Amino acid sequence: MVSFYVPRQPYKPDVQVVVRWRNGHASHQEIAALRQLLTELRDRPIAEVFHEARAMPEWVLAICNPGDAQRLRDRAERMGLVAVVEPVVVPHLIDG
């Protein structure tokens, strides 16, 4: 017996959730928020995370389905980060 039927949702390609640093490079507050958001960063030395974050203009939090991406973006923004959801960028292969 089936109580209700949920129609299959149309396929939506994965997207990425990206944190962008406010001033083009990560601040101490942004790195602290990033470590709070991503549990896998908590076990890494703060200096290592700081060096890695400062070396890039943004941090890709996840590649996931659009629903999960919106929830992660909202969580990141509640922690004070600037987060966006965007299509996954696939680099073009160059024949050598």
Image (cartoon, rainbow, N blue to C red):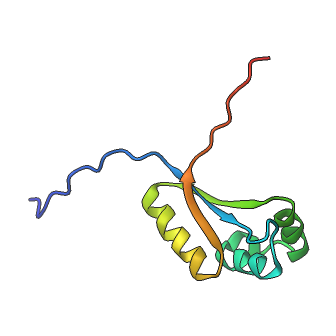
Residue pictured at 55% horizontal, 76% vertical: 75
Q: Residue 83's x, y, as percent?
A: 61, 68
In the depicted structure, whether residue 33 falls above or below residue 50: below
Q: Is residue 75 left or right of residue 43?
A: left
Q: Nearer the viewer, residue 19 or 38?
A: 19
Residue pictured at 11% horizontal, 59% vertical: 2
The residue at the far front in this view is 23
Disc tally is: 0
Q: Is residue 59 left or right of residue 74?
A: right
In the depicted structure, whether residue 9 falls above or below residue 77: above
Name the image quarter holding residue 91.
top right
Q: Is residue 3 left or right of residue 83?
A: left
Q: Residue 88's x, y, as percent?
A: 58, 46
Q: Residue 58's x, y, as percent?
A: 73, 61
Q: Residue 31's x, y, as percent?
A: 77, 76
Q: Is residue 84 left or right of residue 60?
A: left
The quarter of the rendered structure image containing the N terminus is bottom left
The residue at the far top in this view is 96
Name the image quarter holding residue 53.
bottom right
Name the image quarter holding residue 46.
bottom right
The quarter of the rendered structure image containing the C terminus is top right
